[in-house]
Image: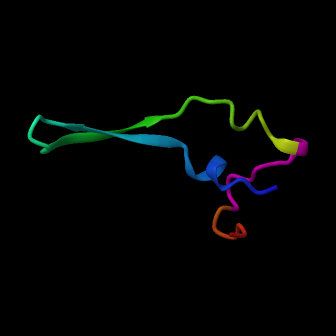
């Protein structure tokens, strides 16, 4: 089964604001998870085939 969140969500964007709501900066923190270890039915998630993936 195709799980798009496994391929898309490699990092989370953290935005830091001041008290008045002005955006100071944002940075991307990689999500350290076991997504590539929890493959259903031992399916291979291709790292190169994202553009031809079915949506």
Q: Quadrant of the N terminus?
A: bottom right
Task: Identify the residue shown where x is 45% and y is 41%.
Answer: 12
Residue 32 is situated, as x and y percent measured from the top left of the image, at 56, 29
Q: Is residue 28 left or right of residue 18?
A: right
Q: Is residue 28 left or right of residue 19?
A: right
Q: Quadrant of residue 28?
A: top left
Q: Is residue 43 in the magenta section?
A: yes
Vertical relation: 9 (above or below) 14: below
Find the magenta span and give its range: 41-49
Q: Is residue 43 left or right of residue 55?
A: right
Residue 40 is situated, as x and y percent measured from the top left of the image, at 85, 43
Q: Nearer the viewer, residue 16 or 30?
A: 16
Q: How is the image coloured?
A: rainbow
Residue 34 is situated, as x and y percent measured from the top left of the image, at 68, 30
Residue ranking furthest to the left: 20
Task: Identify the residue shown where x is 66% and y is 56%.
Answer: 4
Task: Identify the residue shown where x is 27% and y is 41%.
Answer: 26
Task: Identify the residue shown where x is 68% and y is 69%.
Answer: 55
Vertical relation: 23 (above or below) 50: above
């Amino acid at each position: 089964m195709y799980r798009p969140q496994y391929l898309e969500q490699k990092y989370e964007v953290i935005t830091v604001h001041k008290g008045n709501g002005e955006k100071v900066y944002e940075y991307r923190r990689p999500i350290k998870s076991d997504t590539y270890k929890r493959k259903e039915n031992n399916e291979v998630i291709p790292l190169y085939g994202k553009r031809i993936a079915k949506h």
